[in-house]
Image (spheres, helix red, strand yellow):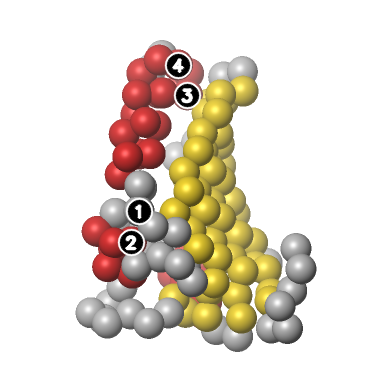
């Protein structure tokens, strides 16, 4: 997209977690993450759930993630369920994000999400970040 004068950098972290292919993309300005996009792709036939049941689960996530600055969508493609979650940290309320368990924070007063800390945390849980 268009940059608004800041040096926006994109970092992409990927992992395969229990059969779910996860892609985390972060847009950051300095150490501050301004936007995060998560894409989860999974073969739902391995879960034992039907497409209808998976859709119900996805709908429950959609309502859980119904907070300011967050967009959640999902689609089915063959046997795959593809979820997309976008968080705009410049618009979101950090307390709401914590309540929805979209972010975890050590301190009570979070003013921004640190790219460095996030990448450390993801890499230690098996993500490959570039």
SS class, disc 1: loop
Is 56 left or right of 120, judged from the image as shown? left
**Of residues 129 and 31, the one drawn nearer to the viewer in this rendering:** 31
How many angstroms separate mark 3 from mark 2 (CA)?
A: 27 Å
Identify the residue at image location x=23%, y=79%.
108
SS class, disc 2: helix
Q: Which mark is residue 59?
A: none
* Disc on the earlier residue, 4 or 2: 4
**Of residues 104 and 100, the one drawn nearer to the viewer in this rendering:** 100
Identify the residue at image location x=45%, y=67%.
91
Identify the residue at image location x=60%, y=85%.
30
SS class, disc 3: helix
How many angstroms separate mark 1 from mark 2 (CA)?
A: 7 Å
SS class, disc 4: helix
Q: Is the Cβ of the residue at disc 3 closer than 8 Å to that at disc 1?
A: no
Q: Which residue is mark 2?
A: 97
Q: Quadrant of the N terminus?
A: bottom right
Foreground mark, 3 or 2?
2
Q: Which residue is mark 3?
A: 44
Identify the residue at image location x=55%, y=34%.
82
How many angstroms separate mark 4 from mark 3 (CA)?
A: 7 Å
Decide: few, some or many residues near mark 4? Use Cα within 10 Å; few <14, some 14-19, many ≥20.
Answer: some
Q: Which mark is residue 51?
A: 4
* Disc on the earlier residue, 3 or 2: 3
Q: Which mark is residue 67?
A: 1
């Amino acid at each position: 997209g268009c940059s608004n004068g800041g040096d926006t950098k994109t970092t992409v972290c990927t992992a395969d977690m229990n059969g779910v292919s996860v892609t985390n993309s972060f847009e950051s300005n300095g150490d501050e993450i301004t936007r995060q996009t998560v894409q989860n792709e999974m073969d739902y036939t391995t879960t034992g759930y039907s497409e209808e049941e998976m859709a119900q689960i996805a709908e429950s996530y959609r309502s859980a993630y119904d907070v300011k600055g967050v967009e959640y969508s999902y689609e089915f493609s063959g046997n795959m369920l593809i979820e997309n979650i976008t968080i705009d940290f410049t618009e979101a309320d950090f307390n709401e994000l914590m309540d929805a368990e979209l972010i975890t924070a050590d301190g009570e007063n979070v003013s921004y999400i640190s790219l460095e800390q996030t990448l450390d945390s993801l890499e230690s849980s098996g993500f490959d970040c570039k």
